[in-house]
Image (cartoon, rainbow, N blue to C red):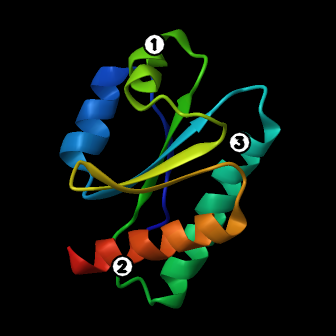
Amino acid sequence: MDSKIIPLQNIDEFKTSILIEERVAILIFTAEWCQPSLNLVTQMKKELDQQRKRLSQQTGAINIFVVDHEKEGCYQIVKQFAPTTLPYVYLFEKGKYIAQFGGLDVFAMNKLIKKALESSRAL
């Protein structure tokens, strides 16, 4: 099963989706006007799915949750994490964040994907 891109609308969805239900999840802060953010979401999903296939799907699907930095309902999530740049990416394992990076950094993205896949295999 491929990863899904799931927009979060509010803090309750964040808590339910990432802190409770997902074992390994990626959270990306974006903005509608920020093309690099939108490109990163698409690029990350593509790379994540390709790397999972190379591992013969020995990992579970890792979903990508997206928070629009300027969406009114997302204010509490933005306030909690206070991303300093867009895009800003967090990796969560069992509800705790374990890695992060900011900006459009392909090296950091690949490093985070590798860590996500390792975490997913370990669980």
> What residue sits right under mark 1 in the picture?
73
> What residue sits right under mark 3 in the picture?
37
> What residue sits right under mark 2 in the picture?
118
- Contact, mark 3 vs mark 2 (Cβ under 8 Å): no
Judge whether 6 appears above or below 90 on screen. Answer: above
Q: In which quarter of the image is residue 91?
A: bottom left
- Contact, mark 1 vs mark 3 (Cβ under 8 Å): no
Q: Which residue is drawn at 75% across and 49% down?
A: 39
| Among numbered discs 1 and 3, the one appearing first in the sequence | 3
Disc 2 element: helix
The amino acid pointed to by label 1 is Gly
Q: Residue at x 69, y 52 (%)?
A: 40
| Among numbered discs 2 and 1, the one appearing first in the sequence | 1
- Contact, mark 2 vs mark 1 (Cβ under 8 Å): no
The amino acid pointed to by label 2 is Glu
Residue 27 x %, y %: 46, 45
Disc 3 element: helix
Q: Quadrant of the N terminus?
A: bottom left
Q: Is residue 26 left or right of residue 44?
A: left
